[in-house]
Image (cartoon, helix red, strand yellow):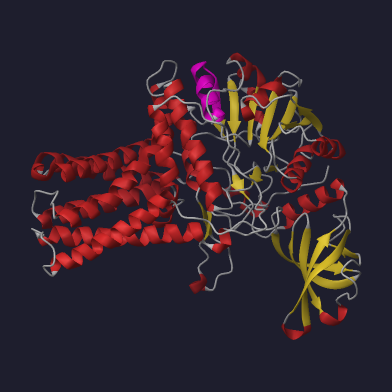
Amino acid sequence: MLLSSVEPADAARHDGREAAGRRRAIQATASLALVVTIAYLTWRILATVNLAVWWVSIPLLLLELHAASGLALHTFSLWRIDALRPVEPVEAASSRVAVLITTYNEPEEVLLPTIAAAVALEPEHATWVLDDGARPWVANLARRLGARYLARHDNADAKAGNINHALQHIDADLVAVLDADHAAYPNLLRHTLGYFDDPDMALVQTPQSFYNEGSFEDVDLRQRWRRSSERRSYHEQELFYRAIQPGKNRWSAAFWCGTGAVLRVDALRDIGGVATGSVTEDIQTTIRLHRRGWRSAYHNEVLAEGLAAATAEQYMLQRHRWCTGAMQVLRQERPLTGAGLTVTQRLAYATTLLGWFDAWRTLGFLLLPILVLLTGASPIAADLRTFAVAFGVTFGLQQVALYLLGRGRSPPLIATVFELVRMTPTLYATMMLLRASAVAFRVTPKGRLDPDRLRGSAPWLLIALLVASLGSAAWYAATLTGLTPITYDPPAVAHAAAFWLAGNTVLLSVAIVRTMAQRFARERRASYRFTFDLPALLNGRGCRLRDVSLTGAHIEMDEDLAPSGARTATHTLRFNAAVADQRCIVRSRERLDGGRMRLGVEFVDDDPVGRAELALWAFRQRPHGPRDSYGRQVRPGGLRAA
């Protein structure tokens, strides 16, 4: 059985292979969509461009051509997502292995679970905490949990420099790299080291998954109308990590994503270490590895979990950094034209790096209906009924093909909302391609800690576009009643633009509301709180555990059993035999119906080993874990304390 973390009953279905009939149906749909798109665009170019209003018709045609190129690149990338057969797990390491945890300013609540889980990995390895913050408490935490500690005198080249500094001091053939917030599953090494039996293998990347449900990137798709309690969620990064990256295996073009990866030290030394020329050192390093003939693989099994961007601000900061790094890589590495890469590797990199320019297409599709309604210009010189049928069939096929190619991991409307949210920082970042100025590395904040609990603020561009859309809708209504100096000829074009505008307005409104939603505001607590419904004991009396973090918990119990007395009184909370008893004080009380009481307790023990046990137990017991490449829930398996 390959995936030991999956329940045995499902093992046969979790071999990473896609049903052949399903794959052929997806490929046929994508091929049909491409053929129809080519025919449609040929007709558009030859027979429908209204050059009398070229300033509207040419941009519209260019936007459609850009959309078609995106479909072609996605078809290439997602044609087959199971080309690589996973290797068998290893029982013992044949090479010297080190796990590197990079950290800068993350709090203990974020860092502790990562160190504890890394030390608990099998087979034998050394765990190193690479602290660019040079914090004494991190050194003490690493020592208490069984890890080694390394700091440096400066922060030159940020994360890349931190790893390069470590490579000069550690004794290892292979290194697994984890961000400070990514807690590894026990099988991270066992399920990836086997790939390195190939002497040309330089890199094995695994999917990034996230345990902080309810983050800004997480959308709950639970079907309440079916009275289903099963959590069905969409995560903004699912398409990339569970479909696009696996598809790159076909061309040995999967790239390092910063965390959850294992790399060969000799390969890194062959290219002079981790690349330091951009703020996305991971993809830049991979390009250099591929140019030197090294291979990469993507192991499509969740083997670590981290923290997704919790707020809109964190989300936009992270996407701005990623896009900025992509522009730096395009300038410095020239992966589309430079020597050393195969044609298929160039196309694979083009899919990822050029995808950031989709923000300009999104902006264009937002502006065009406004322009049409304000000026009365008709960008189409063709019979409108014929155009409506041709456009409708083509657009519909494109959307179906993209959805199927993404294996259902990118619902169009939800994906468009996220595209709108990241549009503003992405537009700014793509302008980096035109200038070579240096950009400082900005760490995405981890943990939501803010005593003021501020709401997010919407990007000014989205607000401006919403105001312009509403204003053009009013202008459209006024024009229909003869109150403006323009006329719509033919009126059907204006009606179509108004319909288009209405859809844009709804999507803009949803994006703005999401960025400003209170539930994505910063929280007072820095430690993520896992939701539970499990039995526990408070002072030996039965209660129900409702949620828990490294700093406290909420429990419910009968009011007559609840402790009374001073707020400073110390109590004992017991989860089960796997976790040491937690000493706590009661911070809040809330009376519930039926003679029940809800207590908020704060843990007062200062033992990192005890907190590590609690963290690993919480990861193991939480009800909603990650899902495999087909959307089925998997269990972390034997996470254990160091």
Q: Position of residue 601 (x, y in %)?
A: 81, 65
Q: Does the magenta stretch include residue 286?
A: yes
The residue positioned 58% from the left and 19% from the top of the image is 200
Q: In this view, does 153 lie to the left or right of 414?
A: right
Viewer-proximal residue, 126 or 93?
Answer: 126
Q: In this view, does 617 lie to the left or right of 228?
A: right
Viewer-proximal residue, 441 or 12?
Answer: 441
The answer to whether residue 35 is above or below residue 249 is: below
Q: Position of residue 278 (x, y in %)?
A: 52, 27
Q: In this view, does 182 lie to the left or right of 356?
A: right
Q: Is residue 247 left or right of residue 577?
A: left
Principal SS element in the magenta part? helix
Can residue 389 be seen by looking at this rendering?
no
Q: Where is residue 153 in the image (x, y as percent from the top left)?
A: 74, 24
Please state, as top left, top right, bottom left or bottom right, where the N terminus lies in the image.
top right
Number of marks: 0
Q: Position of residue 597 (x, y in %)?
A: 78, 77
Viewer-proximal residue, 401 or 525?
Answer: 525
The residue positioned 52% from the left and 33% from the top of the image is 84
Q: Does the magenta stretch include residue 89?
A: no
Give, as a single range, the part of the protein colored magenta: 281-296
Viewer-proximal residue, 45 or 588?
Answer: 588
The answer to whether residue 101 is above or below residue 580 is: above
Please state, as top left, top right, bottom left or bottom right, where the C terminus lies in the image.
top right
